[in-house]
Amino acid sequence: MSEKHVYEVLADAFLQEEVRDCFALLGDANMNWATDMAGKGCRFVYVRDEHCAVSAAMSYARASGKTGVASVTCGPGLTQILTALPAAVRARIPLVVFAGEAPLKANWYNQAIEQSGFVTACGAAYHPLHHPARMPVQVRDAFLQAASEQRPVVLGVPMDIQHQPWSGAAELPAPSTAIRPAYAPLPPNPDELEQAARLIAAAKRPIVMAGLGAVRAQAGPACRALAESIGALLSTTLPARGLFCEDPFNLNVAGGFSTEVARDCFSEADLVIAVGCSLAAHNADAGKLFPASKVLQIDLNPSAVSQGRVASQHQLCGDARLAVEALSERLTALGKKPGDWRSEDLARRIATSPADSHPFEIEPNLLDPRDVAAALDAALPMDWEMVNSSGHCSYFFAQMPRRPQERFHTIREFGAIGNGTSYAMGVAQARPGGPVVLFDGDGSFLMHVQELETMKRHGMKILICVMNDGAYGSEIHKLRSEGLSDEGAVFGRPDLGAIARGFGLEGQCVTSLSELPKLAEAFVASPGSAVWDFHVSDRVVSPVIRRSHAGKKA
């Protein structure tokens, strides 16, 4: 150990935390650590932009269930990630970011800034590692904090200290997994359970709505059983969409992305049973989705207020699965019978009604984005991993109710576009072996188009389906609704297929949706990633925009 440098011991400390994958862009303040990590077996994805390193680590963490790891250099390397960090904070994703710091011995260094202020302003934690003997413990504690608080932790290590000879302890401390508390699932309090059961027993039109908390607690089957026993309908938050994909009474996404049938049903609901949901504003469409319904929140940390609004009137604290199972037992004892809401006619409406039936006149040689999403859903194999980005197009791609939750990845709590390519790379690294499909818009895709080279270099199998309306979709529709010029948000349609080919990938403009099955077969047979460019009409406005700008000047 005496012959080692500090950066080598730091690498050992990360590897002891079972870090097997890392996303990084190398610079003076992190390249020695990263090179040593890679030499010891960690699989690195070397991206072209620091933002993409952290964004890819986010989707990797969500898809793998592990703490994501990324690395950037100091100064401008760190400031590049200040959009990704709050996105991870909002999505409650555990990350550890190894960031360099300027050398402490330098009187002046051109990339030196006060890094902690930038990071903490994003809601993440920042720990400067300035005392070598404590660094292994600080690394261990960073992983412990990221997992327990479900948020990013950034470690700042001065580059000159990294190069010092190691003079600390010969043995590393026990890893975070060895000291992390082992929490058993928490059953609900009997008195609270009784109150919740009687509330449900009195409901005539209940809906069981599940979130990621229900997914993590493996409460899906229990939620379906409860809904069937009381005659309730089913729905999910956007990140949990697909959890009930096989149930005929699944309304799919609850919130701004709800279908017309789902909005009709939610308007009739008198009780929403929110299982493992944060009850964010988008989940309730800012309170407009079920304004007349009571809300029972079942969660380990329930809260009456969420994002500035009263989100639930009743709460039941407990593990999602145990609480739902206990409710089912108690409701059976109370003699609760299913009502008459579930019917063959309603199941038929859910299965056959379009998500959005609003008529639009489509210009010649352009496609309706709703048709594109439906055709892709029909043509692409069910076992492929799907990644939905942000932006106007994400509404259309969310309307794939057949897709199971575990293969449909959505992170959009911060509302930032430009993350799609990174999220796809993170999923590809976490779920190797099969194709990953990214659904994105042209504006979002072009923000980090350089990552096509990363996909090529690392041999990733990613199919990028771009709805190309030649603009920033949300902005043009909002500008038009205000009676303003849309010139500042319209950019034209570059040949995205040619751009992909310039990076050595397959790429083409898809003009006929009937071609998709053959194109999918050709993609499977091809050696790498590809871009499919769909030229869609910019006249099709999602219901999200239509509702939020209803009554404004057209």
Image: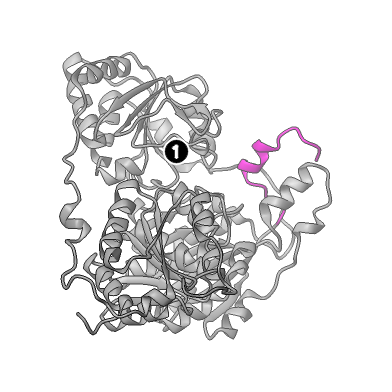
* In magenta stretch: residue 552: yes
Residue sitting nearer the eye, 421 or 58: 58
Query: Colour scheme of this structure image?
Result: one colour
Q: Main secondary structure of the magenta part?
A: loop
Task: Classify residue 83 by image quadrant.
Answer: bottom right
What residue is shown at x 49% (from left), y 74% (from top)? 519
What residue is shown at x 36% (from left), y 17% (from top)? 203
- List x then y, in percent, for residue 39: 29, 84
Amino acid of disc 1 = Ile
Vertical side of 68 occupied by 250: above or below:
above
- List x then y, in percent, for residue 215: 30, 45
Secondary structure, mark 1, is helix
What residue is shown at x 48% (from left), y 34% (from top)? 262
Quadrant where the image shows the N terminus = bottom left
- List x then y, in percent, for residue 181: 18, 46
**Local crowd at mark 1 within 10 Å, few (<14), some, or many (≥20)?**
many
- List x then y, in percent, for residue 339: 33, 19
Quadrant where the image shows the C terminus = top right
Q: Which residue is mark 1?
A: 350
Task: Classify residue 201 by image quadrant.
Answer: top left
* In magenta stretch: residue 546: yes
What residue is shown at x 36% (from left), y 77% (from top)? 33
Q: Is residue 539 left or right of residue 143?
A: right
Task: Classify residue 98 by image quadrant.
Answer: bottom left
Q: Is residue 274 left or right of residue 178?
A: right
Taking the image as drawn, is residue 540 in sight? yes
Vertical side of 504 occupied by 48: above or below:
above
- Magenta residues, start to end: 538-554
